Amino acid sequence: MRVSYLQSRMILVAFILLYLAATIAIGLWASRKVHNSRDFVLAGRQMPMLVGASALFATWFGSETILGASAEFAEGGVLAVIEDPFGAALCLMLVGAFFARRLYRENILTFNDYYRQRYNAQVELVSALFMVPSYFGWIAAQLVAMSIILQTVAGVPFYAGILMCTLVVLVYTYKGGMWSVSITDFIQTILIISGLLAVCWSLYQQTGGWGPVVNALPDHFFQFTPELKPMPVLHWVAAWITIGLGSIPQQDIFQRVMSVRSEKAAVRASWISGGMYLTIAMIPLAIVLFGRHLYPELITDNDQGFLPALVLAHSSLPVQVLFFGALLSAILSTTSGAILAPATVIGENIIRPRMKNPTDEHILRVIRFSVIGVALASVLMASWNADIYDLVAQSSALSLVSLFIPLTAGFYWPKANSTGAMCAMLAGMVAWLICEWIGTEIPAILYGLGFSILGMFIGSSGFLKSIVSPHSA
């Protein structure tokens, strides 16, 4: 019996609701392993390597990759998506090469614990205050994407969709922490890959191969490097380092790397996840090219909604189920980890030091309440800005200009000290904000990164101390 349009839509909506319920159930099941704050934050450092790699892969493989990056790619070609997926894959590779082993040996719960151990408590606090807001845009991007799905499939109003997504993620993240995040990430990774491959193969068969698609594209569409002029090169470099360097000092990366069973597994998980990200992220880019070639009438001003509309209008019900399963998986996996990360920092690095003799139970309760607070702040940001790709870029830029240099110098420059770290964070942040405000031709993050390096060098060299106390020995 042939399924009508209304029946297929009802089946798809039912599948989405069932999938969300199953995700909550799996997350709650995984929460049984949480007995203390270390279990909640780092899954007790007992995560198998492949599960950890899947969780790392799922860190950013969300709405910005499937919806945001694909829309940018369709309009601007390869040069438009250097930031994501290429910069994101670079970040995971660099973490494995230069940071995972060292961080694992520190035996700490958060990145900001490292800033305290390497520098002092003041650096820890300022780094935490800078890190927490950097996640709001990332989470907001996922909430916007979920709302787009629910609006496209079921006609759910935009703000109602945001609230529904927030509630689903909150339930299992609040209960299970990193255990729930990692287990659901592993299952969702399988769904992401199978769903995207099904859609891509279906469209590939309809187009008859790459030839007709590539021939219809503009010249230089697949150009990987910019023209050799100062401004294009600077913008290209900025695109590489926004996520490529800016997301290295982020708590969500740290928690996933530290959750596996050994430092060797942490390194391998980082490398594997980087390779997974770089290859699997090519699938939605191919899908959007096939789709725009086959059905140009679906192209609108809202390119972020192109893929959902394409799949609904021109795919079979099984393909629709696989695609939206993949999309939901990508969004939920990114959102849960992004909410848990700043909540952990709030509990461990902002509130714990100001409590008198806190018990582990108290800290666990604080982190869980912080999960709710972070989610609510992100809901507000999602209401102000609905551009997925832009929201993600803003988040990574913030940590690049303030946190990357103190982290890297702390590992690789013995002369780095607390004064230099504080100067690096403040100088980079102020310079970036000023340049964003006045609108500089050179990307603002390059100014921010440059001033952060300068702040670290001047602060650690003793130059400031000699000015303040010129007669001191």
Image: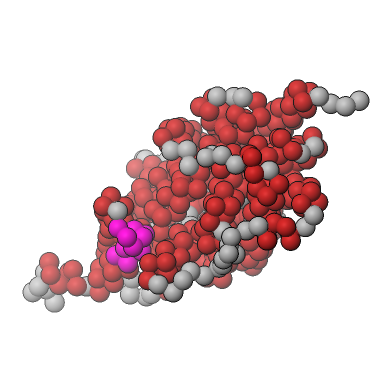
Image height of 29 relative to 195, above or below: above
Is 445 included in the stretch rendered in magenta?
A: yes
Residue 142 in picture, x, y percent from top left: 55, 40
Residue beneath the point at 81% across and 51% down: 205
Q: Quadrant location of residue 383?
A: top left
Front residue of this view, candidates 42 and 229: 229
Q: Is residue 128 magenta?
A: no
Q: Position of residue 376 (x, y in %)?
A: 46, 32
Q: Tell me if residue 55 comes above or below residue 157 in the rendering.
A: below
Question: Measuring 46% from the left and 47% from the top, which residue is drawn there?
Answer: 390
* Residue 206 seen in the current view: yes
Q: Give the residue displayed 46% in from the left and 71% down from the top.
A: 227
Q: Which residue extends farthest left?
A: 471
Q: Which colour style is shown?
A: secondary structure
Q: Is residue 297 left or right of residue 416?
A: right
Relative height, residue 182 to residue 158 (above, below): below
In percent of the image, x 80 and y 54: which residue is there?
208
Which residue occupies the extreme right position in the image? 1
Q: Where is residue 273 in the image (x, y as percent from the top left)?
A: 64, 60
Position of residue 129 measured from the top left corner of the image (x, y, whole percent): 35, 47
* Quadrant holding the C terminus: bottom left
Horizontal side, residue 326 vs residue 145: left or right: right
In the figure, residue 275 lies in which quadrant? bottom right
- Image quadrant holding the N terminus, namely top right
Helix, strand or loop for the magenta stretch, by majority: helix
Q: How many numbered marks does the figure carry?
A: 0
User: For the magenta stretch, what is the residue range?
Assistant: 440-451
The residue closer to the viewer here, 274 or 456, is: 274
Q: Nearer the viewer, residue 251 or 296?
A: 296
* Viewer can see residue 101: no
